[in-house]
Image (cartoon, grey):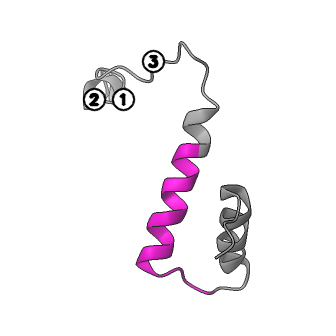
């Protein structure tokens, strides 16, 4: 079995969206994992992400009811 580069596999699966073919669960999970890996490898070394406060309700809405 010939192994494909993750970018090639992701591109093939993304073509499903252009042809309106839904991805099955296995394809979706594999594509998601590839995209997460692709993005994680490209983050700066000192990237710390968002704080818990930034993603909390208070952090998002602030003083709005």
Indicate the secondary structure of the residue bearing disc 1: helix
Who's the residue at 57% across and 51% down the image?
Answer: 35
Residue 42 percent coordinates (x, y): 64, 32
Q: Which residue is mark 3?
A: 48
Residue 6 colored magenta? no
Q: Quadrant of residue 6?
A: bottom right
Sequence-earlier tag: 3 or 2 = 3
Q: CA distance from mark 1 to mark 2?
A: 6 Å
Q: Earlier in the sequence, mark 3 or mark 1?
A: 3
Task: Please state which of residues 4 and 32 is positioned toward the viewer in this rendering.
Answer: 4
Q: Does 59 appear above or below 18?
A: above
Q: Position of residue 44 (x, y in %)?
A: 61, 20
Q: Which residues are magenta?
A: 21-37
Image point (66%, 63%), residue name = 10
**Nearer the observer, 54 or 18:** 18
**SS at badge 3:** loop
Q: Secondary structure at mark 2?
A: loop
* Quadrant in which the N terminus appears: bottom right
Q: What residue would you read off at disc 1?
A: 60
Task: From the viewer's perspective, tell me whether residue 47 is left or right of residue 61.
Answer: right
C-beta proximity under 8 Å, tags 1 and 2: yes
Q: Is 24 inside the magenta-drawn segment? A: yes
Residue with the mark numbered 2: 56
Circle 2: is it few (<14), some (14-19), or many (20+) Cα within 10 Å? few
């Amino acid at each position: 079995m010939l192994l494909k580069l993750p970018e090639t596999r992701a591109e093939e699966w993304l073509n499903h969206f252009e042809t309106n073919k839904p991805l099955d669960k296995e394809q979706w999970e594999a594509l998601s994992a590839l995209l997460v890996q692709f993005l994680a490898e490209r983050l700066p070394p000192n990237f710390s992400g968002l704080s818990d406060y930034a993603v909390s309700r208070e952090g998002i809405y602030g003083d709005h009811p």
